[in-house]
Image (cartoon, rainbow, N blue to C red):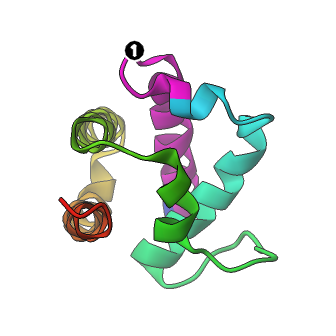
Amino acid sequence: MTTQDWIFRVISSFYDKARNDLLIGYHFRNIPDFNEHIPRIAAFWELQLLGRSEIKISKPFDVINIHTPLNIKRGELGRWLVLFRQTLKEKLSENPEMKTIEEDWEKKLIFFEMTFLRSLGL
């Protein structure tokens, strides 16, 4: 399995859970054709983790500003992180050779958590 395939599997699995989550699922269920966003989200993480993406993106990522209208609460961000980390661990148990990328991903999660908290004024 390639690293790109693994990233895509993590993202797909995570958002399957997140859409059904009682606390944060409504954010994702309100997006029409959400499945069309999965490759873009995977491409974002490929760029963050690998410095490149196999998926061509037509417009740049503006992660903070695109999420601002959602009025994300601290607890929702926390729940997102918990679910994401659970998914990473599950997928890592299936593919232990991805340990290095999982460690890098954890560092990026910490960075984005701090960035989101600052942007939310928390």
| 15 falls in the magenta region | yes
Tell me, yes or no, if residue 66 can be seen here.
yes
Q: Element at badge 1?
A: loop
Report whether 89 appears left or right of 2: left
Q: Hey, what amino acid is under mark 1?
A: Leu
Residue 37 at x, y percent in the picture? 70, 49
Relative depth, front residue between 30 and 5: 30
Q: Residue at x 53, y 24 (%)?
A: 26
The residue pinned by badge 1 equals 22
Report whether 54 appears left or right of 85: right
Residue 78 at x, y percent in the picture? 22, 41
Q: Residue at x 54, y 53 (%)?
A: 69
Q: Quadrant of residue 32?
A: top right
Report whether 61 appears left or right of 70: right
Task: Answer few, some or many: residues within 10 Å of disc 1's Cα (few below 14, many 20 plus, some between 14 and 19).
Answer: few
What is the span of residues highlighted in magenta in the rendered image? 4-26
